[in-house]
Image (cartoon, rainbow, N blue to C red):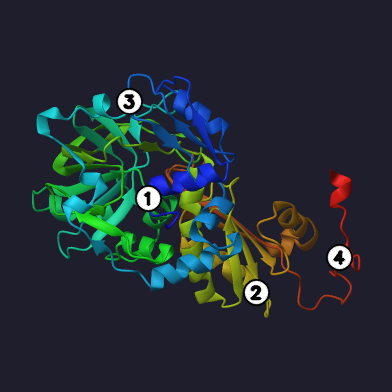
């Protein structure tokens, strides 16, 4: 069976590999789930079997390293960008199944029986979060104009028995909602909780409007994703998900939402946001609740890996000899980009820097290196910066550009940006930048001396 068919098959894979910590002690949703997950970050997924006040287990941190995401895709870490680009270009149509074939429809709860906090173990993650947040819910909706579906993740604050406050940034779901709101209509939306890491990754793809991210997930998996039509709304959701909340984003309604700990490791502010009203909940028998701890490696990599693929394509449109890109964890997988390229003409590296700023507004600092430098080894990158960069001729600064509004050092998102050209000059003396080498070192074996 495909290791990423569902959350459950992936958890079985993690358990088999010794990468799943089963936590049997009683834990509180108030900070303890988030705290223990954070302590295991990058080491093991956290599976909480005894959550205070609930019979439903909670899982978090299901993929917290590049190696785990590559493992889910059955490729090496260095192949992820090319794999993602191929999936964007070759989406795989979903397989529609009937309700009785869908595990997520095993239990149906409607209307007055819904109380989100009584039914689901939704954590409070950080000290000054405004409440309980759904942080791993896939929001799936249809464009009212075209009928095409979109999948995305948004922070969702529980603000009532059946109400969620939602941060909708100006992307595809927001546009769908505004199209409906302008007609005075609500937008039907499903919130899907409990899926595998490939489906989570696909939801973050920077895809053209009208491209269904579930089809990208299918291409990444190598087989069509089984989907089922929701019980009360015209939206198709993964049939093997754990939980689905069916509802509507209400027109012309805004309620207070936030603060909430976000990916830059600061709080996103409180303001009036859109509201989702939930009318139906379907779930598996004995469901598993999934959460993502904000600013954890899982959160950062989920945002970073799909962005890298799209940025790589944009940079190759400017300079075809760009080899690979890396959004670093230290830069929250959003702000710091490292680019590997084969330079054939002077000035190309600076063009790549400018293209990177245009590729995504979040990018703040860009470092460009030659293709023999390992961009996933930050010691190598710093070495290139130390020995191949001079500020008077290799520095690029752009002031007054749009950046991330979640970066507190900006002026309401207006940012200064900086690029470092760390490539070797093409007219340098033959020995000037030749790296030292010990012949035959790759054949030597010292493993026995390290034990």
Mark 3 to mark 2: distance in Å?
61 Å
**Which percent across, then down, holds residue 290?**
38, 38
Q: Nearer the viewer, mark 4 or mark 2?
A: 4
Would you place residue 239 above or below residue 79 in this image? above
**Which percent across, then down, holds residue 8?**
40, 45
Q: Kindly identify which residue carries mark 3.
A: 55
Mark 4 element type: helix
Residue shown at 84%/64% (left/top)? 442
Mark 4 to mark 2: distance in Å?
38 Å
Residue shown at 41%/66% (left/top)? 222
Q: Is disc 1 in contact with disc 4, using a CB cutoff of under 8 Å?
A: no
Q: Kindly identify which residue carries mark 1.
A: 6
Q: Kindly identify which residue carries mark 2.
A: 347
- Left or right of 89? Residue 356 is right
Mark 1 element type: loop
Would you place residue 42 above or below residue 68 in this image? above
Give residue 443's mark. Answer: 4
Tell me which numbered mark, 3 or 2, is placed earlier along the sequence.
3
Mark 2 element type: loop
Tell me which numbered mark, 1 or 4, is placed earlier along the sequence.
1
- Left or right of 447? Residue 155 is left
Tell me which numbered mark, 2 or 1, is placed earlier along the sequence.
1
- The mark tally for this picture is 4
Give residue 241's mark. Answer: none
Mark 1 to mark 4: distance in Å?
42 Å
Residue at the outermost right position: 439
């Amino acid at each position: 069976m495909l290791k990423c068919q569902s959350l459950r098959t992936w958890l079985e894979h993690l358990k088999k590999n010794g990468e799943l910590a089963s936590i049997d002690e009683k834990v509180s949703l108030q900070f303890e789930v988030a705290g223990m997950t954070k302590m295991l970050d990058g080491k093991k997924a956290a599976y909480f079997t005894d959550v205070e006040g609930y019979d439903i287990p909670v899982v978090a941190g299901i993929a917290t390293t590049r190696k785990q995401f590559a493992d889910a895709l059955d490729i090496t870490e260095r192949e992820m960008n090319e794999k993602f680009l191929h999936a964007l270009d070759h989406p795989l149509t979903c397989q529609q199944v009937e309700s009785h074939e869908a595990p997520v429809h095993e239990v149906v709860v409607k209307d007055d029986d819904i109380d989100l906090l009584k039914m689901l173990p939704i954590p409070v993650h950080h000290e000054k979060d405004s409440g309980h947040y759904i942080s791993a819910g896939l929001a799936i909706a249809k464009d009212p104009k075209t009928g095409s579906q979109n999948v995305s993740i948004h922070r969702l604050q529980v603000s009532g028995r059946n109400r969620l406050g939602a941060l909708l940034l100006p992307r595809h779901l927001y546009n769908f909602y505004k199209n409906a709101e302008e007609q005075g209509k609500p937008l039907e939306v499903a919130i899907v909780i409990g899926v595998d890491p490939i489906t989570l990754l696909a939801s973050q793809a920077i895809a053209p409007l009208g491209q269904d991210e579930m089809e990208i997930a299918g291409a990444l998996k190598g087989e069509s994703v089984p989907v089922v039509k929701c019980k009360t709304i015209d939206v198709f959701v993964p049939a093997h998900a754990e939980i689905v909340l069916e509802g509507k984003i209400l027109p012309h309604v805004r309620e207070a939402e936030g603060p909430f700990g976000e990916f830059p490791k600061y709080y996103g502010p409180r303001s009036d946001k859109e509201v989702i009203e939930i009318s139906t909940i379907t779930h598996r028998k004995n469901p598993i609740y999934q959460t993502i701890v904000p600013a954890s490696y899982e959160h950062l990599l989920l945002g970073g890996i799909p962005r890298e693929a799209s940025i790589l394509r944009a940079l190759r449109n400017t300079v075809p000899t760009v080899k690979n890109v890396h959004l670093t964890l230290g830069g929250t997988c959003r702000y710091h980009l490292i680019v590997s390229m084969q330079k054939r003409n002077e000035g190309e590296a600076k063009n790549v820097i400018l293209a990177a700023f245009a590729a995504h507004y979040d990018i703040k600092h860009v470092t460009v290196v030659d293709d023999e430098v390992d961009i996933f080894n930050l010691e190598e990158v710093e070495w290139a910066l130390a020995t191949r960069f001079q500020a008077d001729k290799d520095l690029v600064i752009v002031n007054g550009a749009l950046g991330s509004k979640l970066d507190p050092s900006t002026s309401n998102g207006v940012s200064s940006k900086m690029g470092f050209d760390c490539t070797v000059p093409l007219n340098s003396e033959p020995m000037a930048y030749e790296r030292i080498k010990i012949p035959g070192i790759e054949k030597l074996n010292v493993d026995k001396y390290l034990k």
